[in-house]
Amino acid sequence: MKRRTLIVSSLGAATGAGIAIASHYQNQQQQQQPPFSQERQKEHGIARFAVTEKTSLRERAASQGLIYGAAASYQPLRANLEFAQRFAQECAILVPTNELKWQILRPTPDQFDFRRSDWMARFAQKHNMLFRGHTLVWYQALPQWFKETVNRKNAERILTDHITTVVKHYAGNMHSWDVVNEAIAPNGSKDGLRQTPWLRFLGADYIEMAFRTAAAADPQALLVYNDNNLEYDNPKTEAKRSRVLKLLERLKSKRVPIHALGIQSHIGASSQGFNAKKLRSFLKEVASLGLKIFITEMDVLEKNLLELENRDAIIAGVYQDYLSLVLDEPAVNTVITWGLSDRYTWAANFAPRQDGAPVRPLPLDTQLERKLAWNAIALAFDQAPPR
Ligand code: XIL
């Protein structure tokens, strides 16, 4: 009974706030750019975020042939039973936020500590969820000992040992692995690769080495190249998209075992909107290489958003605009948010609001109730062309 009242009132809020927001968001779009949001606006009018059933995101996604899930950390999943239940209800895939990064898995050069990630893998299995690995090769989240220990001479052995051990540990139980994360430079640098210890020690081939090693350790897991800042319409982002595309083309032409591109999708709530044409054609080109596309870390960040009162609807608007755009591409078959509830979000520390108000980037609020962002995601799934 309580649940029903809550959902009905949240629908009321959705419709009411929709009016204010529709015009706020539209104004923003008119001043700044593209026609996309305005089209959507007309299409859905003020009922933009109204959803009529309680069906979970997991089920809504599944009925269109999509997978929806989220990242979570060991601690809250273990300690907060209500959160764990809500997670299992909404999500068909679980990604450990940090537990499979070197920093946590590798306390010393000779040790692997799988305790937390194993618990999470069991949790996923118990709740009939897929399990996804993030990430084998990254320039961040490296342990203290890395700097003193890894050098040109031993880097290849250390990297391939790490990948082989970790991937074998979960072989047969892993939906997909982010094999390499954020290897393309945000700007500058000649060959487009980010300056990382791996590039310095091993040269550009470390990327294909990582994929080949992962494939040998688990021939079943889907192997993903994952990156950020690919979504917007500006020259820097466009350059990055074309570099990522070149990397993927190069890997495919060398028959490197790679199956998908992960687009992180940490989107600014005050972003200037997307260029539907450019983004679609990027997705098409990726798909034409025979790759799937996963939205891997979506959330909507408020660090540059001044608006406070209507932000839930603004954030929901960004979810709907972005997801409806990317879901038009049939190769996009997985959507993951970087967290499920505003109670546990990296954005609180990494992308706080300027006015210090708690951020609200995710589908559920801090009380684990569905909010407008949830409605927007639900709608985007309902309206997605079935896979
Ligand atoms: C973040 C986690 O959410 C934080 O808890 C951690 O302190 C830093 O890393 N891109 C990625 C993720 O690929 O691994 C990052 O996760 C967020 C940005």
Image: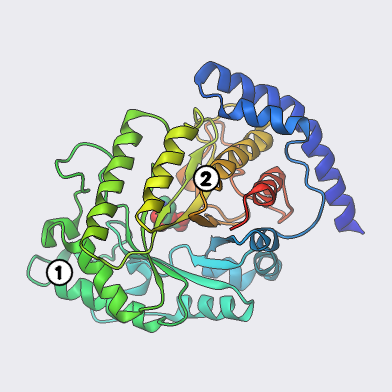
Q: Residue furthest left?
A: 153
Q: Nearer the viewer, residue 243 or 265?
A: 243
Does 68 sit above or below residue 266? below
Q: Amino acid at mark 1?
A: Ala
Residue at the (55%, 45%) spot, across then down: 328
| Mark 2 or 1, nearer chain start | 1
Is residue 92 visible in the rendered image? The answer is yes
Q: CA distance from mark 2 to mark 1?
A: 38 Å
Q: Nearer the viewer, residue 303 or 233?
A: 233
Q: Label 1, secondary structure: give it.
A: helix
Report the quarter where the N terminus lies. Answer: bottom right
Whether label 2 touches label 1, CB < 8 Å = no
Q: How many neighbours does mark 2 have within 10 angstroms: few (below 14), some (14-19), or many (20 or more)? A: many
Residue tagged 2: 326
Q: Label 2, secondary structure: give it.
A: helix
- Checking the image for residue 99, the label placed there is none
Residue 195, position in %: x, y? Answer: 19, 49
Residue 329, position in %: x, y? Answer: 51, 48
Which quadrant of the figure shows ligand 1? bottom left
